Each structure stands twice: as structure tokens, then as C-alpha cells.
Amino acid sequence: MEDKFFKTSMQIAIPVSLQAMLQSSFSMIDQVMVGQLGTSQIAAVEIGGKPGFIFNFVAGAVATITGIMVSQYIGKKDEKSVQKSLSVNLLTVTVIAAIFFALCFAFPENIAEIFTKDNSVLNEAGLYIRTMSVTFLMSGIGIVLAVMIRCRNKAKYPLYISAVSAVVNTGLNWIFIFGHFGSRAMGVQGAALASVLGQAVNVALMIFVFFRVNGKFHFSINLGKSETIQYFAMLVPVVLSELLWTIGQNVNTYIYGHMGTKELAGMSMTGPVQGLLIGMLSGLSQAAGILIGKRLGEKEYEKAYRESVLLCIYGLIGSLVLSAMLIMLRGIYADLYNVEADVHSIGSALLLAFAVLAPVKVENMILSGGIIRSGGRTKYIMFIDVFGTWCVGVPLGIITGIVLHMPIVWVYFILSQEELVRLIIGIVMFRKRKWMNTLE
């Protein structure tokens, strides 16, 4: 049974993980390219990317609900409800994207000022935010459709699409940032423009593949009263938890930014590596949501519990191996950046701290982000995320960074203990099995 489940889970997890790794690796290339321009430019991209960071997590929350609903209805062989679920979630992500677009297009400089007062950073960050505002709708639609395609057991197609769009994005980065093939050198603005065009390619291909895999799509948002209540009972907690979590992460960026531009640049250097390492194992979280969701749809609760434990074990083993590799290679990565010696030192030390924390982060991603959510009782996840972020992480960050003025490495490590608190609460909830639920 374990061998068969391992094979089934890997058929979903590996393409998803490769897709996330691909996106992170090209993000790393983007960061290294911008890193050749200097410390201020690195900080500008870090700040400019924050609205997109928040949006992607909120859109990811909608995608999570899509996965919960679609996987359970596929398990129940209810195709009408599958189509209805996709329709409602596409409409939801469109509304959210419109709100983010309006705010970022109208007030980019105001958003950038939240994180830094450095004028050399503010101007470029504001331009970056306004340009990136047009990507929200494309990104949201692409994220939701990718989940639907994976639920149809075609996880390899979103991987291929990401590969194409990432190559386009990176090639255009090289052209627009540095000025090749007749283009003027646009620096940070060029990186934003390349991202917009890369997202356009991504969503166009995702729509094409979706219709090839799904066939005709019957758009319907005609939910009954009980269906509407059930939907919002799932959606509101997970969107709120993701929104509040990402706002908490932006509070952390505020703390780093007010510690100094060099500290912020050192932290931004670690972002692509963090994304790459977590991305390598993110497929296990997606596999958990889909496979455990189908088990719950079939009301096979004991199998769902046993398979959940196996997925957590796979994640722990993988994260320990990757953390060891990061510890050994972190200095080589930091050498890729054209930055001052103290920024290089900060970045390398932060990578070491992240390597120590990574196994806990991965277990949280699989347990809370995939397994517990698969039952649709997302209020449990809202409690875990909000408590960990706002009762543990943010207060510790303010105390250590703003009040005590501790070095940024210790600020990051101490505030990240919120992950340990989350894991402890998640394990308790998992063992009680109250998260196990079949949608009606």
C-alpha cells in the first residue's frame, strides 16, 4: 500500500515541485541580474514585489478552496459541482485581482513608503509596483486553472507552461534590464516589464491547456443557499488567514527596512533560495490537498489519516537533506551578488538561519497547508496562522528589531519561532481528527 501511495503522491508532487523550483530558480536569476545594479536596486525589487507577494498568497487561498472542492467532488463523481466550483472561484479571484490592481496602480509610492524612507529606493519601487499591478488578474486566473488541471491528474502541463513562461521572462529580463537587441537599459523597470509579459504567456497557455484537458467549460455560479454558506464558510477563513499572514510578513519587511537598506538587501538575497528550497517540497502539500481530499470525498477516513502521516514523513526527510545542502552551498550563492562585504555576510548568515528553520516550515506547509485544509474546515487554519503570526512572530520581530536593535540574523531567527508554535498547534489538531470532513 505504501509503495503504491508513494508512487501516486509523487505523480502529483514532482511536477508541482519542479514547477515551483523552476519559478524560484528563474526568480533567482532575476534577482542576480538586478543584483548587478547595486544594493538600492535589490531593495527596490524586494519592496516592489510585496503587493504581488500578498496577492499570490490570497489567490493561492482561493486556489486552495478550488482544490478542496474539486478534489472532493471528483471523489464523489459529481461533475456538475466540479464545474460550479471552478466558476465561483474564478469569479472570486477576479474580484480580488481588481481590488489589488486599483490600489497598486493608483497609490504605488504610498505603498512603497510603508517599507522604507530611502528616496533612492522609493522611486524605483513605486514604478515597479505600478507596472506589476497589471499582472494580478493574469496570475490569479493562472493559479486557479493550474489547480483544476492537476485535479484532472495532468500535473505535468502546468509544469511545462511554467517552463515556457519562465524562459520568456528571463530572456526579456536580460534584454530590458541591461539593454540588448536595441532596447534601452531600463534596470528595475525592465525587470517589471519582463514579468508582465511572462505572466501574459503563462495565462494564455494555461487557458489553452485547460480547455484541452477539461473540454467544454460550463460557467455557473448558481449556488443554493446551503452551498453558498458552505463556500463562504471555507473561503473567508482561508483568505483572511492568508491575508493576515502576508501582512504579517510585510510587517517583518517593514522591520528589516527600518533596520537599514543593507539589512533589507541582505534579506532580499535569501528570497529566491527560500522559494527554491520550499518549492522543492511544495508538491507534497499540493498532493496532500488533492489525495487526502479525494479520500475524504470517498469517506475513507482511516486511509486519509495514514496517508497524511506518510506525506509528513516524506516532507521531513526531504527537508533535512535540502537543509544540509544549503548549509554547505550558501557561501557560493552569496558570491553571485555584486554587493558590499557586509551585505554578503548578512545574506550568508540569514541562509544558515533559514536552513535550520526549513524542516519546521516544510512540515507546516504539508500539515496545515495541505492535509488539515483538505477537509474544508478552514477556520482551524485561520486560527493557526493568525495566532502564530500576530501573537508570536510580529511581537517578537518588533521587540528584537525595533526596540532592542538586535542584529538582523537574530531578529529573523527569533521571530521565525512562530513556525514552531504553528507546528505544535497543527499536530494537536491533526491528531484530534476533527478536520476530517466530507463536503455535502
Image (tube, helix red, strand yellow):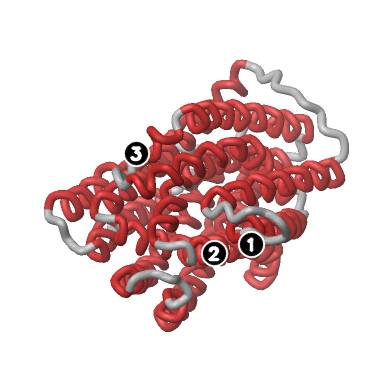
Q: Does residue 36 appear to the left or right of 228 in the view shown? A: left
* Quarter location, residue 68: top right
Q: Amino acid at mark 1?
A: Trp
Which residue, given by chain and number where applicable, does mark 1 sit on?
Answer: 174
Q: Earlier in the sequence, mark 2 or mark 3?
A: 2
Q: Residue at x 51, y 60 (%)?
A: 34
The vertical placement of 412 against 148, above or below, is: below
Q: Are marks 2 and 1 in contact (CB under 8 Å)?
A: yes
Q: Position of residue 33 (x, y in %)?
A: 54, 64
Of 172 and 398, nearer the camera is 172
Q: CA distance from mark 2 to mark 3?
A: 24 Å
* Quarter location, residue 406: bottom left
Q: Position of residue 353 (x, y in %)?
A: 32, 69
Q: Amino acid at mark 3?
A: Glu
Q: Amino acid at mark 2?
A: Met
Name the element at disc 1: helix
Which residue, given by chain and number where applicable, does mark 3 sit on?
Answer: 113
